[in-house]
Every structure is written in structure tokens, then in C-alpha cells.
Amino acid sequence: MSAVIEMSPGSIRNMTVADLDEVMAIETDIYDYPWTRGIFQDCMRVGYLCHVFEQDDGIKAYSVLSVGVAETHVLTLCVRPDSQNQGLGRMMMEHMLELACQAGAETMLLEVRPSNESAIRLYHQLQFNEVGLRPDYYPSADGREDALIMARSLLID
């Protein structure tokens, strides 16, 4: 027997400055070392693809994707704590993959903490491979934590 989670309708849309109070509330709830409001504003200002998933009761998830000539880079993906384990992270990643393909990118890259096992599991399910390591990349309570570099080809065989 499997459980089916029924989500009320929602939509993915462009992030706006008006969303930043909600985004920052999620960001500071999730991360010990959160991005600042200024980082999100800069990402929107320079044209990164910044999106939120919104339902009736507010923003549930957000993402920021940098698009270059041949590659895209997932800069952040976050799901509100009370909305985790409902497929929203996968939905946001699939949305970013679609945007990357539309932009003509050949590769998508991201960094993830080795301690973030659920994210790594999702990325493997979405055909990302570990391609490198950035030592001491993330701040942590114990000093610094490495980042796994993961990549996925967007080229059709």
C-alpha cells in the first residue's frame, strides 16, 4: 500500500522583492548560516532565475538558478520545514531543469553538503553525479564543511 499526498493547487512564479519577507523567514528557519536579503536582491537584479512555489497559505519553496552560456548552476533550493517530504524539492528541481534546457544549457551544476543526505538522494534520482569536492566550502558549527559538486548533462543522447 502506498500513500498518495494530495496537495492543493499552487504555482511556481518569479520571485519578487515583495516575497523576501517570507523567503527570509524560511531561509533563517532552515539554515544556521542563511543568505541575506541583499543576496536575494542581487540575484534578482542581475537576472538569475529566482522562483517561488506558492499555495494559498504562502510560499512553500524557492530556488535560484544562474544561467550561463553552456551551463546552469543551482545556487539555492529550499523548502519550508512544514512542507518538506511532499515532493516540492523534486518539483522545483524539475522546473529548474526545464528552464536550463529552454536556455540551451548543456550541464547543470550544484553544490550540496555531504550531511544533506535527503538532497543528495534526490539529486541522484534526478541523474546528477558527484564530480568533485570543494573543501571547507560551507560554514558550520564545527568550523567548515565540504561541498560535494554534482553535475547532470542536459544533452539528449
Image (spheres, helix red, strand yellow):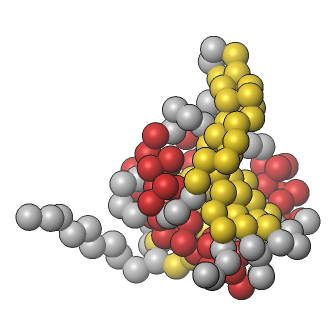
Note whether residue 61 is visible.
no
Residue 94 placement: quadrant: bottom right
Single out the residue that lies furthest toward the right. Answer: 46
Residue 28 percent coordinates (x, y): 62, 39
Kindly identify the residue that appears in the image at 56 percent across and 34 percent down: 114
Compared to residue 107, the image places residue 155 above or below, namely below
**Residue at image coords 86%, 69%:** 68
In the rendered view of the protein, which quadrant contains the C terminus? bottom right
Residue 19 screen position, x and y as percent: 68, 63
Along the viewing direction, whichever of 33 and 54 lies nearer the viewer: 33
The quarter of the picture where residue 36 lies is: top right
Residue 1 visible at all: yes
Q: Can you give x and y, in whole percent of width and height, for residue 131 in the image?
A: 67, 47
Q: Quadrant of residue 6?
A: bottom left
Residue at x 8% of width, y 64% of height: 1
Q: Is residue 23 left or right of residue 125?
A: right
Q: Position of residue 85 (x, y in %)?
A: 36, 54
Q: Is residue 143 above or below residue 27?
A: above
